[in-house]
Image (cartoon, rainbow, N blue to C red):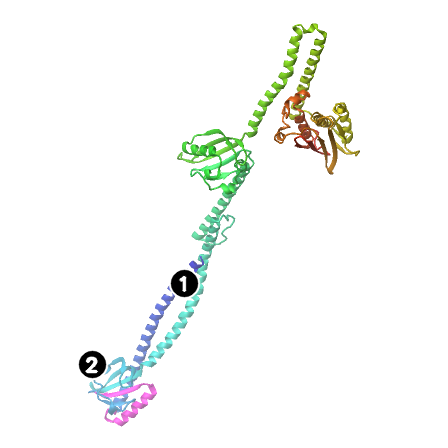
């Protein structure tokens, strides 16, 4: 815009300069003409005065007197005076000896004077070697022409005068040009400044600077244009604000969705991806946007669905397996979006991670199968021994008592199984509120060990209790006792005769308690460690059933520890024993299981 102002100012100055130059030339020429005309008129009058003086004094017949008289006149008027007879012979000249001068009959001014009574010309003088202005009048006496009086002046004087006029005129022109330049600068600034501001604001709008406004007092069309751009900027600012707010809402919604969302254009390039999709596919959006979907996805099934949806435009819903970065089962929903002409412009892909659902379905199926299997064994035993008794064994007291003892044991086992299932169900459904109280954990462990002491003595297993130290925490006494009882019972069951079970307590910090139960038993193979807290999962199934276990003890322990906002960790080496490490908070924030 600065260049435009310069160009406009230069254009104004050029026009004004040309006009002033033309006016200057015109006035200079006019002044030169007027000056020469005035000079000619003056010389003409002087020549007539000299002519009358010559005729009055009859000086044509007195050459010496004529020469003296002409020299006097020449000094007074500052001009060259030449007098010739009718034939053109020079009789007197104030600059040269008349005898040395040639005949002047052919001089233009003299011929004109003889013909019309007056003559003038501007020409180069061969005698004086410079331009001269000549004026000639005839010496008429009673209608007879006796000679010619010619008055001449150096044209250089005229040229000097015209030059002085030109100097004055140029000075006036320059001063006028400066004044007009200042005025044109002010005018161009008043014209271009609003345009510059309009351009600045318009460029700002293209760079999303919608808060800029045009501040000008310009009137007319420029003022209306400024108001229109200000209104446009305000409207764009409001629209962009609304768009940005909607974008933030959309971004917030998409990033807080648990389902993955991908937007693929009709050129098969990814244009949008939310955080859930990044987590499912293992790619960050910044590395994926703009790429073809087959370049970033490692699921050929998903890529095939995207291509099929783009080609057909139909809605698709299928389950796919993704193995990177982790194995997932995904419910993929694909739908095309179109423009006003019905052309497919891209597709929206929604990805729901149903891995947990399918895992739960599988666990439910396995749970039903395990429960059925666990219930079937005691029921089959009870039914078999009952039928045997009914078939006649009831008459034999020894057999009857033996069978009834077995039926009683199986009934107890069945009762324990059902009780454990009900307890586990209540814990998982958070229907067992904790009765939180302050517990002396060392005392609780001692009381719990008394229950299993006889069982440990039978196998000659030594149980080492924690050192005498007051370690207290908040918790449900019965549930805490159940945790210790289950873990110690398991340690005794899976530890050979003459083994050891060690229980230690410590406080790693002011807010937590750590309890460790270690044994020297048979240990757990490494491949089974991730699953030992699953319901009905047994490492040694035959031995577990023989010991009367239900397969739910560790699952109950884990849930009870989690209900106390704690954690359990197991380490084991086959043939060298198992160690359970439990970390519990000293203070419960809630009286209900988490």
Q: Decide if residue 58 is in sight here.
A: no
Q: Position of residue 169 (x, y in %)?
A: 38, 72
Q: Decide if residue 282 is in sight here.
A: yes
Q: Secondary structure at mark 1?
A: helix
- Vertical placement of 437 versus 419: above or below? below
Residue located at (43% from left, 67% from top) = 178
Q: Position of residue 423 (x, y in %)?
A: 67, 23
79 falls in the magenta region: yes
Alpha carbon separation for disc pair 1 and 2: 57 Å
Residue located at (28% from left, 93% from top) = 65
Q: Which mark is residue 494?
A: none
Dot 2 alpha-carbon crowd within 10 angstroms: few under 14, some 14 to 19, many 20 or more: few
- Vertical placement of 185 versus 37: above or below? above
Name the residue that disc number 2 marks: 115
**What is the magenta range?**
58-85
Name the residue that disc number 1 marks: 10
- Vertical placement of 484 versus 263: above or below? above
Q: Position of residue 358 (x, y in %)?
A: 55, 27
- Magenta-highlighted stretch: main secondary structure? helix
Q: Nearer the viewer, residue 375 or 329?
A: 375
Tell us which disc is closer to us: 1 or 2. 1
């Amino acid at each position: 815009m600065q260049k435009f102002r310069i160009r406009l100012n230069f254009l104004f100055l050029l026009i004004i300069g040309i006009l002033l130059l033309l006016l200057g030339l015109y006035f200079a020429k006019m002044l030169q003409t007027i000056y020469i005309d005035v000079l000619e008129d003056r010389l003409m009058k002087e020549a007539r005065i000299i002519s009358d003086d010559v005729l009055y004094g009859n000086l044509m017949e007195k050459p010496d007197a004529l020469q003296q008289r002409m020299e006097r006149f020449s000094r007074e008027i500052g001009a060259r005076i030449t007098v010739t007879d009718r034939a053109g012979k020079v009789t007197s000249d104030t600059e040269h000896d008349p005898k040395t001068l040639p005949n002047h009959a052919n001089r233009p001014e003299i011929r004109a004077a003889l013909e019309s009574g007056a003559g003038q010309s501007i020409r180069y003088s061969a005698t004086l070697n410079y331009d001269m202005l000549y004026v000639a009048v005839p010496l008429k006496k009673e209608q007879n022409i006796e000679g010619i009086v010619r008055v001449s002046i150096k044209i250089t004087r005229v040229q000097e005068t015209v030059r002085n006029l030109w100097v004055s005129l140029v000075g006036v022109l320059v001063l006028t040009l400066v004044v007009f330049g200042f005025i044109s600068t002010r005018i161009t600034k008043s014209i271009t400044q609003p345009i510059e501001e309009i351009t600045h604001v318009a460029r700002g709008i293209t760079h999303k600077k919608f808060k800029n406004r045009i501040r000008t007092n310009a009137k007319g069309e420029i003022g209306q244009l400024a108001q229109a751009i200000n209104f446009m900027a305000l409207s764009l600012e409001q629209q962009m604000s609304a768009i940005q707010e909607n974008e933030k809402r959309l971004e917030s919604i998409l990033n807080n969705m648990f389902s993955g969302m991908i937007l693929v254009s009709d050129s098969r390039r990814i244009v949008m991806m939310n955080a859930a999709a990044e987590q499912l596919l293992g790619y960050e959006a910044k590395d994926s946007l703009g790429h073809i979907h087959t370049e970033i996805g490692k699921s050929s099934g998903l890529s095939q669905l995207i291509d099929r949806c783009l080609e057909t435009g139909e809605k698709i819903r299928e389950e796919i397996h993704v193995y990177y970065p982790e194995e997932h089962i995904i419910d993929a929903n694909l739908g095309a979006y179109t423009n006003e002409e019905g052309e497919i412009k891209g597709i929206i892909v929604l990805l729901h991670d149903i891995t947990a659902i399918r895992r739960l379905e599988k666990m439910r199926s396995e749970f039903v199968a395990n429960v059925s299997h666990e219930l079937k064994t005691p029921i089959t035993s009870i039914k078999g021994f009952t039928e045997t008794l009914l078939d006649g064994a009831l008459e034999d007291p020894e057999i009857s008592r033996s069978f009834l003892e077995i039926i009683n044991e199986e009934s107890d086992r069945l009762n324990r199984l059902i009780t454990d299932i009900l307890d586990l169900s209540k814990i998982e459904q958070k229907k067992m509120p904790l009765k939180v109280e302050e517990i002396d954990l060392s005392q609780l462990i001692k009381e719990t060990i008394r229950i299993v002491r006889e069982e440990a003595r039978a196998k000659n297993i030594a149980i080492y209790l924690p050192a005498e130290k007051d370690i207290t925490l908040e918790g449900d006494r019965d549930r805490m006792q159940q945790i210790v009882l289950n873990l110690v019972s398991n340690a005794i069951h899976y530890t050979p005769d003459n083994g050891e079970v060690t229980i230690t307590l410590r406080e790693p910090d002011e807010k937590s308690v750590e309890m460790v139960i270690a044994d020297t038993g048979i240990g757990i193979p490494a491949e089974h460690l991730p699953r030992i807290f699953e319901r009905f999962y047994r490492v040694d199934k035959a031995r577990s059933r023989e010991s009367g276990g239900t397969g739910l003890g560790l699952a109950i322990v884990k849930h009870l520890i989690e209900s106390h906002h704690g954690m359990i960790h197991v380490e084991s080496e086959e043939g060298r024993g198992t160690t359970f490490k439990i970390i519990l908070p000293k203070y419960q924030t809630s009286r209900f299981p988490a």
